[in-house]
Structures are given as structure tokens and as C-alpha cells.
Image: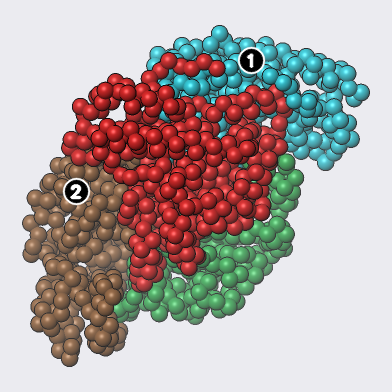
Chain colours: A cyan, B red, C brown, D green
């Protein structure tokens, strides 16, 4: 395999293709005739491995979808009932960066404040208590699910205690907890995390293990943790235009990711690179926007600084901070190398 | 690359992985950092090549989506207006095999009779005349688009004259004509076809060039032929959960398919294999369900015959014919080989 | 009350205001302060009376909505599950004259042939058997409800035996049967009918008793016959913009209609007028389009005949019959008088 | 007409039936045969009168719907484009008390802070500037309409200067401004208001004149002020289940309301009653939650106070204020009399 002679990129964690082991699997299986729509034996094998890794009994409670927004809207709209909406921190991906995909399915996104990108258990409890004490709540959207992402949009993490508290509040109110794990691996492998994959499966009602941003070409593995997969799920997936004819593309990738802990090794590598990246950021004296223990680092830069940075590496303008400064994202992934870091470290910045 | 030691398969045209040239491209570009969401240069190149192949001016009028049902529902729902529905032959994929994906977007599928799997221009004309002469049509769903597939679900083809007639009727009524080309290559390369890709672009208002069933891992290339791409199309795609983060996966595949006529060579190969397959079917004395000039052959078999056939190759139970017989589908694709045909030919059937 | 000096009208059964007894009730209760949204005691009383008339236990299983299309789309969309659609005869109101209101809620209308405006039990049974024997039915819309109207769009009626057969097929497949009774009174009071209101409640899973076309200003009374009212129904009604602030308008009208059998007396009057209307039609030698035992009579006329008819009474151009003839509707209602009939009888037609 | 011997009610402004003049019109026109669906001459007359009162040219740009939530969801969903959502203050009716009716049509409600129940022009300007400067806004919901209500949910009013500023911001960004006038009459007749109906028509792109809460049994009159009524509006209304068969019910009521200024006289009466009600509240020493210049007064009471108050009049528990106190609503309407006020004034409270 040759390497493109492109500028070093810290733009995002989906900047390269797939981890080489995944490409290798695709090549090796390429001529094997397989049934479509996820009925193949690689998909079955991937489901088994993921169920085992999560500690759930039934491999049929694992399903594969293509991308994150698709997964969020499919899960939320098949699990909510007609009169319900989904609660999220205002900064949640479903509230900000999905072009209204949840509302497209006819359901409201109910926003609560974000604190470090996270939903605060106290805010959640307060909202639910107020809702049910409101005499007019029959004219309101009922809270029918709680959505969190881990890591969050800002790269921050829930502690086990926080997740337990949110989970407890949800279960008191008989509301499922859905964890968007588009970057779940980076959360689990962070040295700041006290959560295991088993914990996630125990404390949530449904979650997904992101592939697209953790080394796959595409793909997200949904795990229904309480034997609560919606009835006729495949038909609902088809109805949303989300059923892949060559389901093998998802099955083979996840079978590879969950063989020999590849998913965790990829994640760990990115975290190690991110830890070194943080050191470089500190050494350069750049200001952090937030303290992120995962693979995405958010820093503040003015236009002049960004112009200089852009001479060495590509990066992402993540958001406007104030009139002078922009929030800049630098991210690591499976493809980030020590050489990439060296380019940044040695840059005259 | 090793070959799986599986039973020879004529089940469908998405039974194998990707054409080797596509895998090769994915491997070669794998480490190249590229922007997401289709903003990469391979996607731009693929758009240019497809626009040129279709004879349209603006490469921005080509867009890539992941699968067929997703493409149908995205195109139809972004082009219809609130008061409109889409006309199809009753056997159309959108009416039968998409789990209600069009209705999920809030629009009616208006069915007309099918004749050999096709929409009959006379039926279309009759329906439209009746609609507008009905005094109560303000309480009805307005016809806002005509959907056809080419080849059809049954493998049949529209002649140029037929397509011209349908196109003319649509334009008389100012209704766009949408051609579902999930298997377009097989239609264009059939010796029975008098239609070119240029003809398709000229006679329709929007169509797509199917990749999933013509050698790609996934992907469909939509072509808006009248500078009529819906405004803010990317946002509408995102809203439908259909925007791929690693858009490169689609761009690289289509860039490869439209280099050195690979798309047409793949299609031609499958048609050649299908022509030989038809000879074998005739020689075995099996009864055709319909005369198909493309890569899918539909034949009638009883349970006993299917049991025998199943000893040699895999096939698809396409539909119920009568109490005794099933419609059996045998399909060819890029991966069908002379050896595969020989297995069937030499089988004691 | 003065009478407008307008042309005699047989146009439809919603051509006049409300039955005088209804207006009287609205006047008498006008100053009484009542809670909104159907929480008033007149609504409660109406529910009780209707439950009793239907022989169902729970008055809370009766709900009021404003109009027919609203009722159809609310009932169907709250009772169907995500993967399901509703079966109807192709001539069903939901399939033809509701501008796609069902599809607007994300569900397919599955059309079967109509026979005299009715769904044929054999067609229904055949469709269901075929659906479940189709190997690809996971990619199709599941039949989740059967919709019939009684009387039908064409004024025809189901016999008790037919309704029992359809009901039996539905229950074999665990699919609810929904009867649209926009003109139910006329069906029950027809001398051709062997069905009682109790029968309707026993044989269907949900139905409605139309008010708009049977003497009310507006309003339809929905009856859930199996303690199967959807959870949080009022919230779903509100979500569809269908909750009336002054719910009293519906409650008072239906309380009046179900006091002293007014609903049945209104219906019977219209049927008597329709029987005389049929005699007049026969005496004039006009051709019937269909034999209708209810308040709507459909006849065939050419343009010349309609021009003449229009000099005496107003009528409805119900549909195109052939190149020369139109299907003309003449309808009776609570407001049709012997004098109205005499105008037609004595007309030089 | 007799008067119900019920407790005096200040619960809301839809507590009684219709203004007597409206009932009189319904009675007088009751036997007149009229075409359905708003095609009658009373509806035409009402449209003409309202167009004239608003200073718009085309009476066809006035349309009638049944209720407020229905009107909000119909207007918003027919005017927004696929990629757009509607901006509102967080306290807006569409965001809080419509059970997700807007989201049911597939569009996001974008909430900004409320200030005295109003949308602050500076917040609106800031949001729009930030949106368009965000590099990722193609993945977000585009602002496609601004929704305000006048009076607001809290009874407060926009000044002419404020409305001009909001209107100006909308037009700078080519976004329509929609004013929910469910209680518009009370806003226009408030002594604190410097806005006329002409001003409202000039400064907004679409608004409605509420009937339900201003003396009608039901009904809202929508005014499209820029010849911008959506194409095929009646079909879209039907699709939403919102088309009334006996459209006369709306036409006759609004024709009456806009004859001899009845709409304004009703509103003025309620405002006069509210001004006296405020005096009584002040004299009792009750604490206002907010200073409302319209017909709804919001005060703070603990449980004991509410128990006492409930002995004399009915009222509405509008919301939770803190652990001890509730926000209580006392409202006036066309049916509020000096005698009603005297009951409150003389109560030993």
C-alpha cells in the first residue's frame, strides 16, 4: 500500500480510509457468495462477538447500520411512542448537527442545558419532576427517552457514577436511556474513564458502538441491552432507507473489529496519540477550550494563529468562540502516527 | 485473493463483494487524508466523469447516495411538493419492496397497472386526463412525478420509443420523470436495448446509476439532468440520515467505475453470462416466466425441481406463481464466471 | 327561523346547517361555563349515551373528533405500528379523496379491488395468505388494519354475513377492523340492512358514528370496542391539531343526537326521502349507476340532461363515467322535505 | 336563552359558547343550502370583510381553519421548505403546548430565550448571525420562519417598534414572520397597544385572527399578507385532516364577527373587564406574576389561597412557580359580566 503525499491531517477521526485489517478482510472474502441484507455468516459472527463483549445473551439484539445520524434517527423513532419525544443536552448531536433528522420522523427533541457537553443528572431530574407536576402535560410532548453521547460532542466523558445516576432516573420514570457511542472506543480507552463496555451495556437500554470514526469505512453496531429490540426491526430499517443490500460490508468490518480486540487497540492507539498531542498543545502555550480526555482536542485560536497552523497541518474550525477566536479541533485516529505528531511538534508555531 | 469454496450462486447480483478494480482503488487511497461528506477530490472527479458520460453540463448535478431505497425516497421526497404523490406501475420497487419508505416521507404512491413490469404510456395518459377532468381533484393527491425502473423489477426494458412517449406525457403535464437505474448498466448493455446513457439523461429529469448491483460495495449515483437539483440538497440528505461521513467510499468507487468504461464492461460481462444462462435454461427445457433481455432470468419451477436445482447452485425464490410453482430468479453479475455456468450446464437437471 | 330562498338542493348530505334540536341545545347551554378540551359534563353524558347505544362497557372508549378525514387519519395512525399499513378497497375514501392524509402520517394505504364499492372477503383472504407466504415480506408493508366504510362511497352496504366474514379474517390474522361510519345512520336505517349498532360494535375493533353528514354542524364519535383506545390518545389528538378547545361543541351535539333516538330518526327520515327519490328517478327513466339502498343515489346523465336538471335542483358531479356520461349524485338528509321531492317530481325532465 | 346556574368562571377565555350574534347568524342561515368546503357565499363575504379590515388586496389570501394548533401546524408546515425549521421564544405555544404538532410535520422548532414571554430582537439577530457564520450549518436546520404570538402566552404585547425590528430582521434574511393571533383582538384593543390590524398585516408575512378565544364556537382566520398563500393550499389543508365539510360554520361566524366591528367590540369588552379585574387583584393584595395588559391575568397563590378562591370562582392552574406557589390564571372574555367581577370583588378573600 502506498501512502498519499498529502498534508498531515488532524482534521477529524474520519480523515483516512479503513484500518488495514479491515481492508484485508474485505479482500479475502470478496469472492465468497453471501446472502444479502445482513443474513450472511460474517454478520452473524460479528453479532456473536459483540454480544459476548457486551455481556448480553442474545446476538440477535445486535444490529448494524451505516452511519451515526441514521442510527440515531432509526433507534429513536422506532423506540419512541407517538406521544413522546427525546431528551438531550442542548449540545447533543441530534439537536444541533443532524439537520432535523429526529423531527423528520415526527418527534420532538427536548433540550436541557449542557454542562461540559454533558446532561446534568440534576437538570434531568428537575425537568421530569416539573413535567409530571404540570397540570397541562397532556398537551405537551412526553419525555420518552434520554439521549446522551459518550464521549460527548466536546470529547468529555461521563463517570460511572454519573451514568449510574442518569440510568437510575430513567428507570424510575420507565424511560429508556440511549447512549450514542459514535466514538465509544475512545471513551472506553481513555485513562480518565472508569467505565467498561459491560458497564455501558448494563446501565443503558440501547447504545451503539461506532465504527465509522473508529477505523471502519462505515458502520455502527447497535446493541439492545434488555431484549428490547423493536418488533420487525428490519422492516423499520428498510422503511427508513437504511438497509444495506450488501450487508456483508458491515458484518465483515465488525467481525474484524471484534477479533483480537482490534476495536480497543485502535481506540487505545488514538488515545495515546491524543495524550501526546495534548502535551504538544501545552508546550506551544495554546489555550484549551475544554479539558478533553479523549481523541478530540478543542483549542482557541485567532485568525493569525490558524493561518500559521494551516501551513503545517489540516484542522477543523469546530465553532465560533468569540469575535476574535475560533474553537479549533485537532483529532487523532487509527491513522495518526508519531511522524504526524512530530510535524506538529517541530513546527515553528 | 483467495476464492471461498462456496456453492456457485445465481441468487442475485449482489452476492459477491466488489469488482477487484474497486478494491484496488480503496487500498491505494486508504492512507490519503481526505475531507468528509463528499468534499474530497475523488468524489469531485467521479462527478465530472459521470456528468461527461451523461452529457450534462454541471458536475454538481451528480450526487452519491448509499443504497437504492434510500435513493428513491430521498429523490422522490425532495422533488415532490406537499400536495403531490408519485405514479408507478403497481410492480414498481417503491410500491412493493421498500416497506413503505416513500409513504414514510408523507407522500402517496399512486399505482397504475404493470405490463411486463412496465408502465404503459396509454395507462399514464389515461390516468392524467381523468385526474384533471375530475371535479373533486382538489381532494385527491396530485400526480407530481412519474417513477419507472430500467431494467424493471422483472428484468424487462423500455424501448427508446416508449421512453420518449412517457417523457413526452410527463412534460406535457409538467411532471418530472424519475428513472430508477439500480441495474441501469445491464439495461444499457443488453443487445435488445436501443437506449444510450445520453438518451436516458435527455429523456428523464432525474435518474440514478446503480452501483450496488453493478460491482460496487454500495452506492448509487444520482443525476439531475435539468439543473434541477433540489436546493440545499446536502441538508435534506443529512435530514434523512443518508449522508456518509466517509464520502470517499462512494467517490472512489464511482471514480473507478467510470474510468476506462469499467461500469459498462462489468455490465456487458453480466449480459454475456446471462445470454449463455438463457441458452442453458432453454436447453434444460425450463419454462420462462417472462422474456428478460437483462441479467435477471425468471423461470417457473415446482418444489421438486427447486430441490434438485438447489443441489448445484443457490437461487432466489422471487415470488409465488401458482399453487404448484414458484418464480425462480437466476441472476448474473460481474462475478459470474464461465465455470459457474458450466456447473449449471453440466448438472443432471 | 326563516328559510333561505335558494334552489332546492340534492347536492349532498351536508348542504344545510344542523338539525334544529342541535341548535336549540347549543343556545340553551351557551352561557354555561364549561371546562375545555372535552372535559365538560355534556361530553361525558354523550359518551355514556353512545357507549350504552353500542353496548360497550366503558364510556371513556368513546372520543369525539371534528371531521371524517381527521378521524380516519387519527385512528389509523395511532393504531398502526411502524411497519404496518392499512388495507382498503381501491374506492375507499382514504385511498381516493383525502389528499394523502394517511400517507402524511407515514403509513401506506394498501389497495385491493372494490366490488360495488365494497371490500370482498375473498380478496382480503387471498391477499393476506399471499403476503405471509411471500419470502420477501420483511421488505414489504405489513397489513396492520382493515378499513371499510359503511355505507360505502357508493352508498352500498355490507350484509351482516359479509361483515362477520371480514371480521373473522381480521381476527384470524390479529388485525383490527376499522369501520368508517361517516354516514353510519343511513346504513343502519336502510330497509336493506340486517345490521344493528350493536352488531357493528361487536364485529369491528373501532368505528365511528358520523355526525357531520347526519345532522350535526360537525363532529364524529369514535368508538373503541375492545378497551383498545390508544394510550395517551388526547395527546396524540393534540399532536395532529385535532383537539377542539371548545369541546362542548362536539359533546352537546352528540348528547342531543343520542337523546330520544334523534340520530336514528334523522337517518330514517333521510332514508324515507331517498326511497321516494328512487321512485322519482325510476319514473323519469334515468339510469342508475349502482343500486344504492341508502341516502345517496348515483345516476348516469349526459351534459344535456344535466343542464336540464340544473334548472330545477342542485346536484353533484360525482365522477366521470364515460366520454358522454357523468355519474350524478342526488342525496337526501335531515333537511330534505316532501316539497323538495315534489320540485323534482314535477319538473319537466 | 336561559343562563346556566353555574359557578362564576375566570378559568379561560373559551369557557362559554359563542357570542349571541354568532348563534343568531347560524340560526338564520341554517336551512339555506350551501356548497361545502368553504365554497359558500358567507365564507366569501367573510374573506372580503377581513381582507378589507387588514388592508390586503386579495380576499383569496384569507383562509379559515378550525383551531389554533391546527392553524399553527398547517401554516408552518406548508410554508417551510424541507431543510428549514421555525424559530420561537422557548415559551411559545408551538414549543410547549402543542404535543409536538410541528415536529409531527417533520420540522424542528428552534427555541430562543423568552423575555416577558416575547422573542427579543437582539436574540434573534444574534442567532441568525451565528448560524450563517457557522462552517457546519449545512448539517443544521436552517431558520425558515419566525413565529411569535401576540398577545403572548403570558398576555404580554409587542410594541410597534419591537414588531418593526423583528420584521426588519426577518426580511433582511428573507425569512417569513408568522404571528399567532389566537387572542389578537385582546392585543389590538389593549390600551397599552400602539399596533393596529393594518400594522400587523404590514409587518408580518402571515398571521391569524383567532376566533375560538374571541367569541366564536371555533375558527381561526389566516391572512397571507404578501400574495404568498401556498399553492394548492386547500389540498394541503385536506391532507392534514383540517378541511371542514360544512365550511359554512367558519364562514358564517367570521362574517358575523367582521360585521359592525363585532370582533373588536368583543375584544374591547374583555379588556375593560380585565382592567377592572386588575384593580380587584391589586385591592386584594395578590401578587402579579407578570404585568399583563390583556385579558389574561397571571397571579401567584399558595394552596391555601387557591382553596379559598375556589369557593367563589373557577380559575386555571397555569403553571408551577416554586415549591409553594402556583401561577394562577384569571381570564376575561365576551361572556364576562360586571356581576361576575362583583362576585370576586365581594368575596371574603
- Residue C276, image quadrant: bottom left
**Residue D36 visible, this orientation:** yes
User: Dot 2: few (<14), some (14–19), or many (≥20) neighbours within 10 Å?
Assistant: some
Which residue does the numbered mark 1 point to in the structure image?
A266
User: In the picture provided, is A307 more to the left or to the right than B58?
Assistant: right
Image location (x, y in percent) of residue A323: 83, 41
Q: Residue furthest top?
A: A260
User: In the picture provided, is A236 more to the left or to the right than C59?
Assistant: right
Chain containing the residue with disc 2:
C
Q: Say which element carries label 1.
A: helix
Image location (x, y in percent) of residue B209: 53, 43
Q: Give the residue at x 50% y 19%.
A: A29
Q: Is residue C108 above or below residue A296?
A: below
Q: Give the residue at x 42% y 48%.
A: B192
Image location (x, y in percent) of residue B187: 46, 45
Q: Give the residue at x 62% y 56%.
A: B227
Q: Is residue B240 above or below residue D297?
A: above
Q: CA distance from mark 1 to mark 2?
A: 57 Å
The foreground one among D10 and D78 is D78
Q: Give the residue at x 63% y 60%.
A: D176
**Residue C256 visible, this orientation:** no
Q: Residue furthest right?
A: A348
Q: Is residue C183 above or below residue C139?
A: below
Image quadrant occupied by the C terminus of chain A: top right
- Residue D192, image quadrant: bottom right
Image quadrant occupied by the N terminus of chain A: top right
User: In the picture provided, is B267 more to the left or to the right than C230?
Assistant: right
Which residue does the numbered mark 2 point to in the structure image?
C123
Amino acid at each position: 500500500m502506498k501512502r498519499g503525499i498529502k498534508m498531515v491531517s488532524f482534521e477529524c477521526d474520519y480523515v483516512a480510509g479503513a484500518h488495514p485489517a479491515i481492508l484485508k478482510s474485505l479482500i479475502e472474502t470478496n469472492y465468497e457468495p453471501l446472502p444479502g441484507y445482513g443474513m450472511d455468516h460474517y454478520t452473524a459472527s460479528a453479532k456473536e462477538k459483540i454480544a459476548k463483549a457486551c455481556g448480553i445473551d442474545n446476538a440477535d439484539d445486535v444490529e448494524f447500520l451505516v452511519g451515526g445520524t441514521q442510527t440515531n434517527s432509526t433507534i429513536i423513532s422506532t423506540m419512541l411512542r407517538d406521544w413522546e419525544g427525546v431528551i438531550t443536552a442542548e449540545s447533543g448531536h441530534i439537536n444541533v448537527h443532524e439537520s432535523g433528522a429526529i423531527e423528520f420522523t415526527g418527534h420532538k427533541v427536548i433540550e436541557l442545558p449542557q454542562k461540559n457537553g454533558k446532561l446534568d443528572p440534576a437538570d434531568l431530574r428537575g425537568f421530569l419532576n416539573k413535567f409530571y407536576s404540570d397540570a397541562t402535560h397532556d398537551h405537551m410532548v412526553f419525555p420518552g427517552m434520554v439521549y446522551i453521547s459518550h464521549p460527548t460532542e466536546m470529547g468529555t466523558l461521563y463517570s460511572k457514577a454519573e451514568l449510574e445516576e442518569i440510568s437510575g432516573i430513567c428507570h424510575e420514570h420507565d424511560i429508556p436511556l440511549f447512549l450514542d457511542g459514535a466514538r465509544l472506543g475512545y471513551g472506553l480507552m481513555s485513562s480518565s474513564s472508569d467505565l467498561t463496555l459491560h458497564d455501558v451495556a448494563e446501565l443503558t437500554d440501547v447504545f451503539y458502538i461506532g465504527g465509522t470514526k473508529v477505523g471502519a469505512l462505515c458502520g455502527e453496531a447497535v446493541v439492545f441491552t434488555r431484549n428490547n429490540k423493536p418488533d420487525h426491526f428490519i422492516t423499520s430499517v428498510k422503511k427508513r432507507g437504511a438497509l444495506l443490500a450488501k450487508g456483508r460490508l458491515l458484518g465483515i468490518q465488525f467481525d474484524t473489529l471484534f477479533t483480537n480486540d482490534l476495536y480497543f487497540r485502535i481506540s487505545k492507539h488514538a488515545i495515546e496519540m491524543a495524550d501526546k498531542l495534548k502535551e504538544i498543545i501545552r508546550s506551544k502555550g495554546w489555550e484549551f477550550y475544554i479539558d478533553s480526555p479523549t481523541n478530540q482536542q478543542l483549542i482557541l485560536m485567532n485568525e493569525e494563529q490558524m493561518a500559521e497552523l494551516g501551513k503545517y497541518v489540516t484542522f477543523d474550525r469546530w465553532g465560533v468562540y468569540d469575535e476574535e477566536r475560533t474553537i479549533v479541533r485537532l483529532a487523532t485516529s487509527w491513522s495518526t502516527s508519531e511522524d504526524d505528531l512530530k510535524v506538529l511538534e517541530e513546527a515553528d508555531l
